[in-house]
């Protein structure tokens, strides 16, 4: 599958006349709780030739390939990506921490990684993850039968919010790292059991709600909602991002 993804990225470069600076896995396969039938969510950052930025009309800043049952691939122009980086877009910060990288210009990656803590807004990230987990928990985990995967779609952002609160830093992408914010051995065992089921079940698998996890989630939501005003905001200097933009556009 990796060879197929690399081939698709190369075809995109040739067709769109772009340079892919970074490409990674962004979904459940990178988070660490994929099902056998999980698709591949490939995301990339690209730059165009400088002349494409020197025109009256804005060039479209997103490239999306047709989605099939196995592969979902899309990318953002470097200018769009750096604007979202400045505004602490959580998905983008996750991409640059993905354990599965398909393409990478080392210098670009190192500059992005090196400025993360300066530009990442703990406040914005905290509220993003807390809101995500709360919405899914309240809307999708209250029935007599629930989708198995939804537990992980609640727990991962909930643990990310907890990570931000207790460590005051950019949370990692991988679930295995995020779950260390919980020191309850019984809950960790419940999560292990659920992971084993998830890795053998398809994406549509339904289960009965798990009381202990329901309580854990509810308690953590209450705790973190009460802590929301203790998270501070940070802001990096845009000039740094302008330099990165100019360097990797001029370099084509």
Image (tube, rainbow, N blue to C red):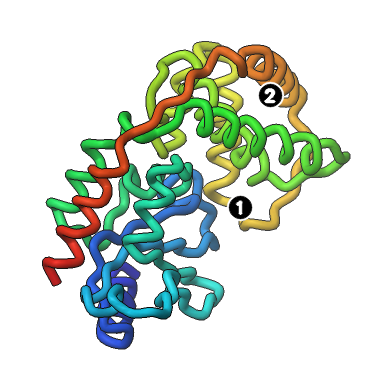
Q: Residue at x 25, y 40 (%)?
A: 113
Q: Residue at x 45, y 42 (%)?
A: 87
**Which percent across, then down, holds residue 22?**
26, 59
Q: Quadrant of residue 7?
A: bottom left
Residue tagged 1: 201
The answer to whether residue 13 is above or below residue 247 is below
**Which percent across, then down, holds residue 29?**
44, 52
Residue sticking out furthest to the bottom: 15
Residue tagged 2: 217
Element on which disc 2 rests: helix
Q: Residue at x 46, y 78 (%)?
A: 65
Asked if residue 216 lies left or right of residue 40, the reply is: right
Mark yes or no: residue 32 visible.
no
Q: Nearer the viewer, residue 123 or 214?
A: 123
Sequence-wise, the earlier of marks 2 and 1 is 1
**Which percent across, then down, holds residue 231?**
52, 18
Q: Residue at x 52, y 26 (%)?
A: 123
């Amino acid at each position: 599958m990796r060879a197929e993804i690399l081939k698709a990225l190369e075809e995109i470069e040739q067709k769109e006349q772009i340079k892919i600076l970074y490409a990674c896995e962004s979904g459940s396969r990178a988070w660490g709780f994929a099902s056998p039938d999980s698709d591949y969510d490939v995301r990339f950052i690209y730059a165009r030739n400088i002349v494409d930025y020197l025109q009256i009309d804005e060039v479209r800043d997103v490239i999306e390939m047709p989605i099939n049952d196995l592969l979902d691939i899309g990318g953002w122009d470097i200018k769009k990506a750096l604007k979202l980086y400045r505004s602490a877009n959580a998905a983008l910060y996750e991409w640059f921490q993905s354990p599965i990288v398909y393409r990478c210009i080392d210098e670009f990656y190192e500059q992005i990684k090196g400025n993360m803590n300066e530009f990442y807004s703990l406040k914005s990230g905290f509220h993003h993850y807390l809101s995500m987990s709360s919405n899914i928990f309240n809307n999708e985990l209250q029935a007599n039968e629930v989708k198995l995967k939804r537990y992980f779609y609640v727990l991962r952002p909930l643990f990310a919010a907890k990570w931000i609160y207790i460590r005051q830093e950019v949370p990692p992408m991988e679930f295995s790292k995020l779950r260390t914010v919980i020191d309850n051995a019984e809950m960790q065992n419940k999560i292990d059991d659920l992971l084993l089921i998830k890795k053998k079940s398809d994406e549509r698998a339904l289960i009965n709600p798990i009381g202990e996890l329901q309580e854990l989630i509810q308690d953590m939501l209450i705790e973190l909602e009460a802590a929301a005003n203790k998270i501070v905001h940070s802001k990096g200097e845009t000039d740094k991002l302008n330099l990165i933009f100019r360097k990797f556009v001029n370099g084509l």
